[in-house]
Image: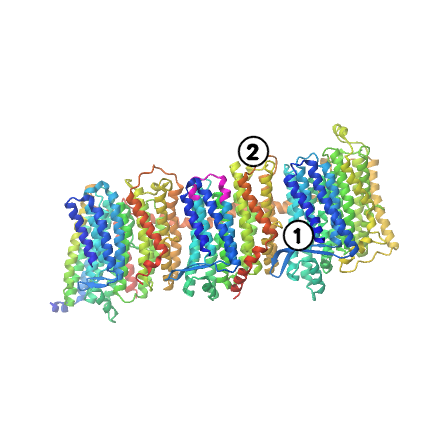
């Protein structure tokens, strides 16, 4: 395992994660479809998860990988709630575009 | 530790009671239970200890704050009955969620490990998402929930990233180890970046400028009781956690970091107050006032002596005032579709007591003497000047002047306008909560040392 | 027997008055205010006997704040003013029907409590707390029981509140700064500090903002006229009779001794401001249409002179200022009461709608005239003693100050007599004007009596205040 | 004994005042009048006692009551001083006072508020006594302002008429201008000599080495301003003619005999101060002379009987100031006394006339009263002769002394003064002729009611006329009792009674001649030609200017009153609002900011997240990339 890390170097993992993360961020910024925004957020989380794994290998310690399970579980719970909200929104408004969510402002 | 377990147990008990169809009993039992938990928690006060190889660390800090959270939860649970009158079917869910939320809160102030911290914050957040959108039929509520959810999970992503970087730098999630390592000379740059990311994530949770935009919308949209919860419990939890994070994890805060804090705090106060001036919706107004108070509380990150005590004092005074205010708001805006200021017209005539209580709460938030709010500000200013941030204090002072503008707008509405409705019977529980909250607030004002010296 | 008793009585009074219900409220309030007066007499006595009437109890240990009340001659004098005027004010209000009387009367007593506390506090923070507390009741009194259209009343009151609070918050910062220096809020420790001129200037400035707004000095007076006009008679009396004395008292008790060098540095500007206030106030008062506004500006002029006296930083100045404070307190209360009496009969404060009253009410006319003459400081009235002393002290700094400040006796006579002429004299008014009833007469007579007695024999008050003023002066010149 | 008696002397009128103000209405008019009169008579009796005592013993009586005002470097007490000067003043204050009270009982009998009138008169006497008896400048100041107050009350006695009220207000305020001067003078004296007590002042000044003369002169000048206010000298004289709005006895008592002489009293009292300020003395002399001339010229053409007398009073006071300015205090005092006699008599006479004509004051509607009003006419004649300086009447002696002193010091002043007295003779006899001679010009209805006034009115007239006739005896040119009597007061020795040589007699002659010329012209115009002054509209030329008093009132009104009022308007309407908007503008601005801020909070999640990210980037950049 570690030889791979030695060849690739931890920095690149970080860069990859950052890039993925940024993609996620951009997704949140630019997409207006709630589902896709969810997915972008998932991308962010998974980018982090990836980094976690990389770090745990890097440090030769399992905590990181365990943490990934935590975060995945949490993400799942989050999405569940999110989707529930989304459903009720769709029921009430017949759309899932977050641009329509502008009743509260000022 | 046992506090945390007890709370979760209580939450489960609520669900069970629902199953066994003791719906009536749920609220009383959970209140009694919470009181018991409170006692339990206090009993732990003088026995700091670490559990599950430092997953949970019970300290004076954690217990005292947990106590505050529990008290607030008691109030909120008490208010639930009236609030969910028409929705008794799901009463157990609401209560249970609140209790689990409390569990998350307690975990957040007593974590000894970033994993615990993350779990805590997520438990809290998810519970809040649910509560925010709990009024399924109302578009506003949905929107609020959605907004909160999207931005909240975005923030969690940031926090998670931060944690990850910290882990990457330190190779551990354990707070104590991290802080030991943080003294060592050679630190990878990821560590401070990680700290900053977590910091920013938390700034979002306490709704500090420029991460505050969600607050007013969500506060306005959510059901009033949830707003109460957010503006009191959630805010206090977040600031306490942030405080613990920054103090526990890295040794000294660099000068630049301090400037960042100063700027954010100034910005939060100013923006919050100025924006609040022109609000007509009371919940919205209080949201902005909450933003400004977040700015005030951030000052505690800068001060050196007895910062924790000051923070505890400030947050308790703020939260108690908030509870008192919201219980009145709940009464006034009960089965109204909005919380606009004109609902309060003539409250001074129709219901003098509640009007007086609301006035007291607002005066406390505005920092007028004998209310705890004043002393909170006083101690804060005192120590901030001691730490040498006089300019920050000046800004704070100017802001407190501005804040009078909108707090008194509400008071004026209550006393100077003619009532536009007949007075309705006031449920006992609202009186009880409001009175107790404001009395506690004033008591804090008379005997600040009680709270102030807990963490000295 | 110590000073805390006075506060207890007033506070308890406020509470019991509220509980006693609308019927009894006024009576109960009167009883308690009289009780307070009795206590302050007793305090005066035990002070003269040299007993220790101070009350000090530790309160908050971090930051170190004590619940410290101390009374020297000056404080006692101010207490006497407060506790003597409060019953008069309450008594004078018997003629007016308040809705929800219990609240207003308990608010009045509460305000008296707060103001008494301000005069007594020996701990900077305690003082600040009382100072702020006194704002709340007057705010509600003016807001709820005030007169005129609700909207601009609200406007005036909220401006007043924010404005005064704004001033005092900077004072708070100054106090905290001092605390950092001295490690305590106790007044002696603050006196003992020796600050650099720059520090003093800042501190002085912060205090000045608070006091200049409260007193008020031009150009910080913009809240005054409107609030006086909008507030109910009792509110106006409390404001003008006692509350603005708080500002002046604080100048003498806190501002000057704590930052003396700054005071000396800017003496001319400060005195100038005061005198400018005298002239400006008098001139503006000249053409006011509203009786209460006119009186408001007249009191702006008078307090300007008082302030000038206290900033003259010599014994005569301070003494004259205090004497004049007391005298002005009584006169202005009397005058506003007169305005109220007229309002009760004519439902107007517009001078143009008055006139030709003297014929119908000789007694009232005479009392009114005496008050007018007192306010223009005719010799043998108390005001003359104060004004003379102040002007003398100014002449010691620079004779021109005395001359300019002295214009008050000309301009004052001008606008007051003009007012009197248009309010009271002239062809008998068509509207009937009932002679003052017993209550009204009694209140006025007491005020007039006080003015004459101390106008002819001011020695007691003089001996009361002089030692403490000398002490303060030594602190100033340390 | 002395103390109590002095207190009686002081308080008797005050008690009268108290009594009349509270019970006067109930006990009926005459009774209240009698009580008022008795109060003053009582003081008069007490005064007589002190007079005899002091005249014999030459010992001043000091009375200290109690401390009043405490100043750091000195304290002022309620103290009274009975010495030659004060007693002399008290004599004619209380004496003439009693006569005028007596007169008023009948004169005011038709007035519903008679008891008030007497109350005020008593109060006035009380304050006048305080003014005179006070042993220090501040007690004097009490009286000084007190008499001002009383004159305010009495001028505005008929308070239904706003013009009268205006006159009263004017009098009070102009006096106050003087009072400020006096006050400043007191300050300077007080801070230089640490005392305000006459005796200690005198000794302080006498004992002082290297006196700062400039300071002293300033003080003296300020005091003189005060005197101007009280004694109606240029530029503060315009209130006195207006003061004639008051009832005639008031004009007689306050605005002729007593109050207006307070200035002279004060200056005489402080002669030791003024002696050290020669410049100020010159100013006083000039002001006095000019005033006497100006007032006289105005008096030439007035048609209101009381206005003429008012201006003649101003003019006479001018002469007294002239004397004061030349350091001849005793001469001034002498003229004060004689003037008190004949001017009081004249006013009361005119009052009697007005009474007979039911309030008619315009001489153009009088005439031919000799037949019906014998006594009034006769007394009036005597007084007119006296004021015109015709021997052997009192006025002749006093005025002659003044002219003499003027001549000795400065010929120009002498000329002015002589001119003034010539005019005096003229206008007085013009008055006399127009009022009493030829045929009655009033309405028939008035004609039928013409009658001599009752005894209560004529008696005082007679007494005063006698005094006016023989008053000169107290200071005959050759041996002057008065000068001897007053001598102890003056620091520099009184220049001894002039040895009478040619010059003196010529001067005397010239003076008398002047008087006769004046009378002659008047006789020619108004007896021979039977001239009657035209009605107001067709008065033209110089006469018009004179008739309108050189338009001084208008000028003052324009310069002071109007300007200050417009300033007041400006402040009220613009400065105040400006200030307000300036202060509370800040609040408006923040409010506006809040309003604008609402636009940013536009509810779009995308925007919120954008801000979030921007904030994040900003912080990270600042902390890591910027380093």
Q: Which residue is mark 2?
A: C432
The extreme right residue here reads D502
Q: Position of residue C331 (x, y in %)?
A: 55, 47
Image-based side of C173 in relation to B257, left or right: right
Total marks drawn?
Answer: 2
Q: Chain of mark 1?
A: D
Q: Residue at x 74, y 40 (%)?
A: D102
Closer to the camera in the image, C454 or B338: C454
- Magenta stretch: give its range: C90-104
| Picture disc at residue C280 | none
- The chief SS type of the magenta part is helix
Q: Is residue B119 above or below residue D430?
A: below
Q: Is residue D410 visible to the viewer in this orientation of the structure?
A: no
Quadrant assignment, res B236: bottom left
- Secondary element at image label 1: helix
Residue for badge 1: D141
In this view, C436 is above or below B131 = above
């Amino acid at each position: 395992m570690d030889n791979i890390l030695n060849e690739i170097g931890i920095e690149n993992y970080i860069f990859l994660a950052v890039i993925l993360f940024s993609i996620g961020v951009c997704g949140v910024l630019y997409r207006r479809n709630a589902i896709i925004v969810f997915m972008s957020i998932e991308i962010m989380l998974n980018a982090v998860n990836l980094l976690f794994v990389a770090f745990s290998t890097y440090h030769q310690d399992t905590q990181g990988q365990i943490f990934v399970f935590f975060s995945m579980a949490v993400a799942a719970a989050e999405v569940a709630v999110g989707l529930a909200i989304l459903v009720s929104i769709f029921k009430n408004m017949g759309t899932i575009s977050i641009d329509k969510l502008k009743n509260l402002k000022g | 530790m046992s506090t945390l377990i007890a709370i979760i147990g209580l939450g489960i008990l609520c669900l069970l009671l629902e199953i066994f169809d003791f719906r009536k009993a749920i609220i009383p039992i959970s209140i009694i239970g919470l009181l018991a938990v409170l006692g339990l928690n206090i009993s732990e006060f003088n026995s700091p200890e670490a559990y599950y190889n430092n997953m949970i660390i019970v300290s004076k800090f954690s217990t005292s704050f947990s106590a505050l959270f529990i008290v607030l939860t008691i109030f909120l649970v008490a208010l639930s009955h009236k609030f969910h009158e028409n929705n008794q079917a799901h009463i157990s869910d609401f209560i249970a969620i609140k209790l689990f939320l409390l569990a998350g809160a307690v975990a957040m102030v007593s974590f000894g490990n970033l994993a615990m911290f993350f779990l805590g914050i997520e438990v809290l957040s998810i519970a809040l998402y649910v509560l925010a959108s709990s009024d399924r039929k109302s578009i506003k509520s949905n929107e609020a929930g959605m907004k909160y959810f999207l931005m909240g999970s975005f923030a969690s992503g940031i926090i998670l990233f931060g944690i990850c970087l910290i882990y990457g730098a330190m190779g551990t999630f354990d707070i104590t180890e991290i802080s030991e390592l943080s003294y060592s000379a050679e630190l990878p740059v990821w560590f401070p970046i990680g700290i900053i990311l977590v910091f920013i994530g938390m700034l979002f949770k306490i709704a500090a400028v420029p991460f505050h935009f969600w607050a007013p919308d969500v506060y306005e949209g959510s059901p009033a009781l949830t707003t109460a919860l957010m503006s009191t419990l959630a805010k206090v939890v977040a600031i306490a956690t942030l405080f613990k994070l920054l103090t526990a994890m890295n040794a000294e805060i660099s000068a630049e970091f301090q400037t960042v804090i100063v700027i954010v705090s100034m910005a939060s106060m100013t923006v919050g107050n100025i924006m609040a001036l022109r609000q007509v919706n009371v919940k919205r107004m209080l949201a902005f006032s909450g933003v400004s108070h977040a700015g005030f509380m951030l000052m505690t990150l800068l001060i050196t002596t007895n910062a924790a005590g000051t923070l505890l004092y400030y947050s308790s005074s703020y939260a108690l005032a908030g509870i008192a205010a919201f219980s009145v708001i709940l009464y006034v805006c009960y089965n109204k579709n909005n919380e606009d200021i004109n609902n309060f017209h003539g409250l001074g005539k129709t219901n003098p007591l509640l009007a007086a209580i609301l006035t007291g709460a607002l005066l406390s938030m505005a920092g007028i003497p004998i209310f705890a709010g004043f002393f909170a500000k006083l101690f804060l200013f005192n120590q901030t000047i001691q730490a040498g941030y006089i300019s920050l204090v000046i800004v704070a002072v100017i802001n407190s002047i501005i804040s009078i503008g909108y707090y008194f707008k509400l008071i004026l509405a209550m006393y100077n306008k003619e009532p536009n409705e007949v007075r309705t019977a006031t449920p006992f529980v609202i009186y009880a909560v409001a009175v107790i909250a404001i009395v506690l607030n004033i008591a804090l004002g008379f005997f600040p040392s009680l709270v102030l010296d807990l963490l000295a | 027997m110590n000073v805390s008793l006075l506060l207890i009585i007033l506070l308890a009074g406020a509470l019991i008055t509220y509980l006693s219900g609308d019927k009894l409220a006024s009576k109960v309030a009167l009883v308690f205010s009289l009780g307070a007066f009795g206590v302050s007499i007793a305090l005066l006595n035990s002070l003269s006997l040299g007993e220790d009437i101070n009350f000090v109890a530790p309160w908050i240990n971090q930051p170190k704040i004590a619940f410290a009340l101390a009374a020297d001659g000056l404080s006692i004098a101010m207490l006497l003013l407060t506790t003597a005027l409060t019953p008069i004010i309450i008594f004078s209000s018997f003629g007016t029907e308040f809705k929800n009387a219990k609240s207003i009367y308990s608010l009045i007593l509460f305000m008296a409590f707060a103001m008494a506390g301000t005069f007594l506090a020996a701990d900077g923070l305690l003082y600040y707390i009382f100072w702020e507390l006194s704002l709340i009741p007057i705010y509600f009194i003016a807001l709820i029981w005030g007169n005129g259209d609700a909207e601009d009343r609200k406007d005036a009151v909220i401006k007043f509140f924010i404005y005064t609070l704004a001033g005092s918050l900077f004072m708070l910062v100054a106090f905290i700064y001092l605390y950092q220096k001295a490690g305590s809020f106790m007044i002696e420790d603050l006196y003992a500090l020796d600050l650099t001129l720059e520090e003093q200037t800042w501190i002085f400035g912060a205090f000045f903002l608070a006091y200049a707004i409260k007193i008020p000095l031009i150009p910080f007076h913009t809240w005054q006229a409107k609030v006086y006009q909008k507030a109910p008679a009792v509110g106006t009396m409390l404001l003008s009779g006692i509350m603005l004395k708080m500002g002046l008292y604080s100048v003498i008790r806190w501002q000057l001794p704590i930052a003396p060098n700054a005071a000396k540095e800017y003496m001319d500007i400060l005195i100038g401001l005061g005198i400018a206030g005298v002239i400006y106030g008098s001139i503006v008062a000249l053409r006011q249409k509203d009786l209460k506004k006119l009186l408001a500006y007249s009191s702006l002029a008078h307090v300007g002179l008082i302030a000038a006296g206290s900033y003259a930083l010599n014994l005569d100045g301070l003494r004259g200022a205090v004497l004049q404070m007391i005298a002005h307190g009584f006169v202005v209360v009397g005058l506003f009461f007169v305005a109220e009496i007229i309002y009760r009969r004519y439902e107007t404060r517009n001078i143009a709608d008055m006139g030709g009253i003297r014929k119908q009410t000789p007694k009232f006319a005479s009392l009114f005239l005496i008050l007018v003459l007192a306010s223009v400081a005719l010799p043998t009235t108390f005001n003359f003693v104060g004004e003379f002393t102040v002007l003398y002290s100014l002449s010691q700094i620079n004779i021109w100050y005395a001359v300019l400040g002295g214009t008050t006796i000309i301009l004052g006579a001008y606008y007051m007599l003009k007012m009197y002429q248009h309010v009271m004299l002239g062809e008998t008014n068509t509207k009937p004007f009932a002679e003052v009833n017993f209550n009204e007469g009694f209140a006025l007579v007491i005020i007039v009596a006080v003015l004459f007695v101390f106008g002819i024999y001011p020695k007691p008050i003089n001996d009361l205040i002089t030692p403490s003023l000398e002490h303060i002066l030594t602190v100033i010149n340390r | 004994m002395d103390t109590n008696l002095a207190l009686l002397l002081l308080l008797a009128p005050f008690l009268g005042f108290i009594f009349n103000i509270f019970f006067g209405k109930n006990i009926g008019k005459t009774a209240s009048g009698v009580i008022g009169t008795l109060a003053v008579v009582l003081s008069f009796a007490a005064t007589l006692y002190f007079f005899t005592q002091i005249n014999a013993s030459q010992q001043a009586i000091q009375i200290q009551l109690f401390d009043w005002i405490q100043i750091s470097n000195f304290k002022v007490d309620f103290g009274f001083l009975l010495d030659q000067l004060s007693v002399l003043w008290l004599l004619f204050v209380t004496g003439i006072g009693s006569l005028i009270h007596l007169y008023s009982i009948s004169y005011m009998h038709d007035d519903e508020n008679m008891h008030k009138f007497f109350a005020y008169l008593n109060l006035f006497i009380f304050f006048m006594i305080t003014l005179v008896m006070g042993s220090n400048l501040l007690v004097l100041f009490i009286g000084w302002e007190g008499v001002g107050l009383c004159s305010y009350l009495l001028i505005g006695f008929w308070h239904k008429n706003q013009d009268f009220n205006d006159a009263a207000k004017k009098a009070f305020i102009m006096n106050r201008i003087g009072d400020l001067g006096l006050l400043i003078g007191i300050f300077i004296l007080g801070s230089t000599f640490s005392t305000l007590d006459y005796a200690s002042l005198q000794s302080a000044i006498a004992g002082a080495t290297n006196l700062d003369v400039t300071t002293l002169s300033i003080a003296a000048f300020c005091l003189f301003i005060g005197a101007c206010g009280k004694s109606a000298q240029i530029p503060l004289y315009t209130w006195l003619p207006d003061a004639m709005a008051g009832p005639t006895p008031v004009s007689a008592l306050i605005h002729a005999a007593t109050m207006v002489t307070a200035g002279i009293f004060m200056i005489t009292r402080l002669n030791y101060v003024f002696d050290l300020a020669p410049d100020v003395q010159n100013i006083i002399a000039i002001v006095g002379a000019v005033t006497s001339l100006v007032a006289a010229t105005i008096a030439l053409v007035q048609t209101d009987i009381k206005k003429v007398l008012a201006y003649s009073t101003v003019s006479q006071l001018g002469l007294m100031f002239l004397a004061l300015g030349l350091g001849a205090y005793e001469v001034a005092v002498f003229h004060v006394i004689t003037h008190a006699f004949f001017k009081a008599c004249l006013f009361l006479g005119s009052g009697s006339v007005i009474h007979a004509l039911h309030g008619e004051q315009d001489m153009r509607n009088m005439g031919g009263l000799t037949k019906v009003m014998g006594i009034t006419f006769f007394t009036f004649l005597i007084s007119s002769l006296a004021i015109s300086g015709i021997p052997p009447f009192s006025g002749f002696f006093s005025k002659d002394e003044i002219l003499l002193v003027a001549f000795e010091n400065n010929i120009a002043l002498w000329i002015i003064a002589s001119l003034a007295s010539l005019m005096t003779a003229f206008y007085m006899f013009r008055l006399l002729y127009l009022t009493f001679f030829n045929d009655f010009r009033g309405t028939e209805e008035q004609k039928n009611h013409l009658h001599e006034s009752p005894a209560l009115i004529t008696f005082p007239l007679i007494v005063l006329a006698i005094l006016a006739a023989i008053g000169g005896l107290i200071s005959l040119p050759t041996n002057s009792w008065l000068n001897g009597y007053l001598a102890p007061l003056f620091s520099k020795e009184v220049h001894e009674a002039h040895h009478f040589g040619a010059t003196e007699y010529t001067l005397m002659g010239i003076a008398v001649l002047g008087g006769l010329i004046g009378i002659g012209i008047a006789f020619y115009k108004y007896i021979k030609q039977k001239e009657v002054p035209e009605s107001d509209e067709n008065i033209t030329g110089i006469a018009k200017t004179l008739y309108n008093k050189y338009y001084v009132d208008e000028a003052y009104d324009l310069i002071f009153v109007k300007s200050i009022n417009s300033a007041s308007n400006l402040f009220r309407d613009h400065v105040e609002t400006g200030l307000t908007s300036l202060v509370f503008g800040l609040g408006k601005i923040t409010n506006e900011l809040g309003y604008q801020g609402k636009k940013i909070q536009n509810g779009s999640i995308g925007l919120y997240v954008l801000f979030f990210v921007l904030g994040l980037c900003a912080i990270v950049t600042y902390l890591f990339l910027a380093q």
